[in-house]
Amino acid sequence: GVDASPGDLFERPVLADLARGLETATWAEETAIVPVKRGGPLPLSFAQQRLWFIDQMEGAGAAYHLPMRLRLKGELDREALVRALDRIVARHEVLRTTFAVVDGEPEQRIAPADEHGFTLLDHDLTGRGDAEGELLRLAEEEAAAPFDLAVGPLVRGRLVRMGSEDHALLLTMHHVVSDGWSIGVLERELGALYAAFARGEGDPLPPLPVQYADYAVWHRRWVEGPILEAQAEYWRATLAGAPELLELPTDRPRPARQDFAGASVEVELDEALVARLAALGRRHGTTPFMTVLAGWATVLARLSGQDDVVVGTPSAGRGSSEIEGLIGLFVNTLALRVELSGAPTVAELLGRVRERALEAQRHQDVPFEQVVERVRPARSLAHTPIFQAMLAWQEMPGGGLELPGLDVVRLDAGEDGAAPFDLTLSIAPRDGRIAGTLAYATALFDRVTVERYVGYLRRVLEEMAADERQPVERLALMPESERARVLEAWNRTGAEHPADACVHHLVQAQAARTPHAVAVAHEDRTLTYGELNARANRLAHHLAGLGVGADARVALCVERGPEMVVGMLAVLKAGGAYVPLDPAYPDERLRYMLADSRPAVLLAPAGLAERFAGSGVPILDPADDSAWAHHPDTDPRPAGLSPDHLCYVIYTSGSTGRPKGVAVPHRGVLNLVRWHQRAYAVTADDRSTQFASPAFDAAAWETWPYLASGAELHLLPAAVRAAPDALLGYFSRSRITLAFLPTPVAEAVLDEVDRLGSPTLALRALLTGGDVLHRGPGAAPFRLVNHYGPTESSVVSTAAEVPADCAGAPPIGLPIENQTAYVLDRWMNPVPVGVAGELLVGGAGLARGYLGRPALTAERFVPDPFGRAYGGRLYRTGD
């Protein structure tokens, strides 16, 4: 006769202490539920009102069907079964209830008991060869068939005869008149009534003290009281500031409108793990539900990257003895906010979850619908409010349905079903194990993804049970097989490349092989390999005489043209590193880069030289070779030059501060060249393009792999670079076979290809990168390859060919030869597939560092290739 809650048991676990506490507990007579008159309008309960509203949404109805599928082996007394089902409908008014709309508001309408029996359809599959398949079809049809809440009935079934002593009973109730506890009530009453009627006896069940409509009226009055006002305030304060959406990594974008289609996978925790979890719970005063909730919240937090998650859980809502034996919708939903901030240990997280669960139970009388009204989250048709993941602990009283003379077995519900939430973990104790299902929204997830999530939950619980002292953020999530895949298998990229050569050595060798082949073409000018090599050699000898040697920098501020390529090659031949400066940059930025790089020489035409007046750096006009025309055209041999010396210095955008000069050695560029030659089968027959500004690192990628292969490099004129139709026209006229274009330009060209149909092109592959790609190649007659790479990693770190039917943003692929790429969380743990994290790259392509700064061993960077910033860290392999 007094109010007591589960929290009282946790606060006073000793029986004598609990007894003394109950002596001063509040008396509960004032909350008794009493019958109300049936003459006037009967309101819906708050929970019914919410489900009635959801039912008005297209596609939402089947998400709230409660199916029961039973196989009955033995001699069935059909008459006794039908009488028992009819009696249950007569006994429980809610099963005879429909919902009419009066003045825009729904009301309960209860049909008389003598006018409304149980709707049971018969099917006979005796002797059919496809009986089992047809039974499955009927079961799916029965569970999915819509209910009409205004017409009814809202409980129905089918009796399928498979043989003389083999039947299947398929029952379905709408959630608006039932809940999980109610299924247990129905099973107990069906068993008792069937047994009595089969023996020729009368109804053995005692009359019900109240009906569901009485509860609905009482509960609405109760919610309006001061106690419930205080409870509602608890929920408003507890959920204030909680994230409104759990941003799990999904296989598909979230649709604008939730479609409620779902499926499920099995979940099972073995006896040994359950025993260890029970011991963990005893040490920390948590129930199995609380312990699993801590593990489930950890998985959700790690997958979403959010350290504040809200998990919904059903509460039976049957705190009064009068309603314990009623069928009806009493279940309430509690929103449990689990905060994992502050790097808690497992023990500390269990304490937080225990406290939050007990608080929620002490405030469970407020209907979830009222919680939503108080919290006022942003409403969306795309997802449920407040939470999108559930944990349902389905431990129901009673031992299931027992019918005398029959073996009753539950039929497998199959994988397909409804999904009111993104993820619903429904589990219960079973013979020493914990088992159940993880239901998921098929609009968001693939089955294989959810199976991985089940594995993550199991692994986290194992880690929790093994050591409660470790921080939750350090708990292993992935099994060893998946960890090995993302860390090792995807990073097996080892390949041979020259160990003692520099980039210009490859170009020199090619010039010796094909001196008369065209090396560089720009507008109406060309240079053969012999001419390019000779001009670069004469300038290189001159630069060496000015003090240019290993690691010395030479700045180049030239317009696109053959002189640009001659200057770059000459600097390398002299042993130095070129520092490209874009003439389009503002004077202030150019002067800063010149001062920071401290070059020995500046190559700039006469028209640009005045911009650098007063810099103190010697300036040479690359178009006026009178000062070095007398030098020999033989290849210089700088002393002591190795692949570890600088090849070029490229400046970052400066989006996080002052621009930084990334110091890239020959070794990284050589690796890029050799990978590119193999990946795209580059030969002397190819014709490629150079699009990027030389001040972007992509220009190095566009230049050296082709000149090292004897290909014909076309420097694209400004007019061609300005429009996709002009680019396609140039590609066609010049028989271009390989081209790189920044992502936005590549997308525009692909759109133009779509518009033209199938233009005549020699193009074998279009390479792109630098921004998020949003499409595939479609019907384009060439390959489309997506790349990613920061300036600090010699242009390209990863690559992926984009399939024609690609939907959404294509991936950036796997690391290229001799490179590594890892996606890690903020604690340096590898994250599972699809989970957001920091991208860490390393390997042979890694830069030496930034000019005037330490080597790249743990420095955060934000390079800006083609205008888009990427964040992350670089780690040198071996450190």
Image: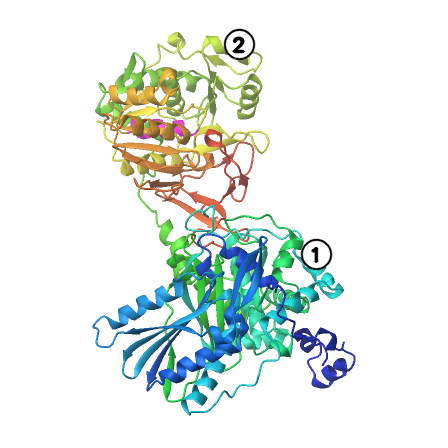
Residue at 28% x, 23% y: name it: 731
Q: Which residue is mark 2?
A: 610
Q: Position of residue 872 (x, y in %)?
A: 51, 42
Q: Which residues are magenta?
A: 697-708
Question: Which of the two residues, 117 or 475, is positioned nearer the viewer here?
Answer: 117
Q: Is residue 877 left or right of residue 752?
A: right
Question: Which of the two residues, 815 or 260, is positioned nearer the viewer here?
Answer: 260
Residue 365 visible in the current orientation: no
Residue at 35% x, 10% y: name it: 630
Q: Which residue is mark 1?
A: 237
Q: The residue under label 2 is which amino acid type?
A: Glu
Q: Position of residue 48 (x, y in %)?
A: 56, 63
Q: Position of residue 747 (x, y in %)?
A: 37, 31
Q: Quadrant of the N terminus?
A: bottom right
Residue 855 part of the magenta-drawn span? no
Q: Is residue 295 left or right of residue 813?
A: right
Identify the image quadrant of residue 82. bottom left
Q: What secondary structure do most residues of the magenta stretch adopt?
A: helix
Question: Which of the two residues, 268 or 347, is positioned nearer the viewer here?
Answer: 268
Please say if 401 is above or below 852: below
